[in-house]
Image (cartoon, grey):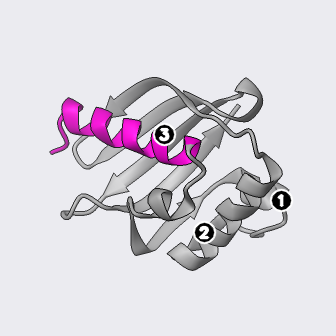
Amino acid sequence: MISREQALAFANEWVEAWNSHDLPRVLEHYTDDFEMSSPLMIQMSISETGTLKGKQQIGDYWQKGLDKYPDLHFKIIDVLVSVNSVIIYYHTVNNKLSAELFMFNDEGKVYKSAGHYN
């Protein structure tokens, strides 16, 4: 079970890592073989299915995003908690709304995530 305090600590560290544009720091939150889904992958012609697996592939995708948006800055709106998952609801690029679901393994690392955008 993930506590509210653990979820908030994760969310704050995750956002700080992104806001620092430190990709290795961002990737520390994930397992080596984690899977991510996002409609942005389809829009950017990165993945026809909208899903990538593994730190290398996803890291390459995220690096393209950091390069495209050098002023990228996230701001947390709320953090929602479940048994083994967390949702961060936040403002993203151009103040758009986003929610990201994170599924955690027993070691506290994210093994699956999904980005949601308005």
Task: Give the distance between the C-alpha atoms of the residues marked 3 and 1, in whole angstroms.
Answer: 22 Å
The residue stretch that appears in magenta: 1-19
Label 3 element class: helix
Q: Looking at the image, is mark 2 or mark 1 earlier in the sequence?
A: 1
Q: Which residue is mark 1?
A: 44
Q: Which residue is mark 3?
A: 15
Residue 108, can we see it?
yes
Q: Looking at the image, is mark 3 or mark 1 earlier in the sequence?
A: 3
Q: Residues within 10 Å of mark 2 (few under 14, many from 20)?
A: some
Q: Nearer the viewer, mark 2 or mark 1?
A: 2
Q: Return the x and y of residue 109 as percentages of the image width and height.
A: 31, 61
Amino acid on which disc 3 is placed: Val
Task: Give the distance between the C-alpha atoms of the residues marked 2 and 1, in whole angstroms.
Answer: 15 Å
Q: Looking at the image, is mark 3 or mark 2 earlier in the sequence?
A: 3
Q: Are marks 3 and 2 in contact (CB under 8 Å)?
A: no
Q: Residue furthest top?
A: 77
Q: Return the x and y of residue 102 as percentages of the image width and height.
A: 41, 50
Q: Name the residue located 82 percent from the left edge and 52 percent from the top edge.
A: 68
Q: Is residue 68 left or right of residue 3?
A: right
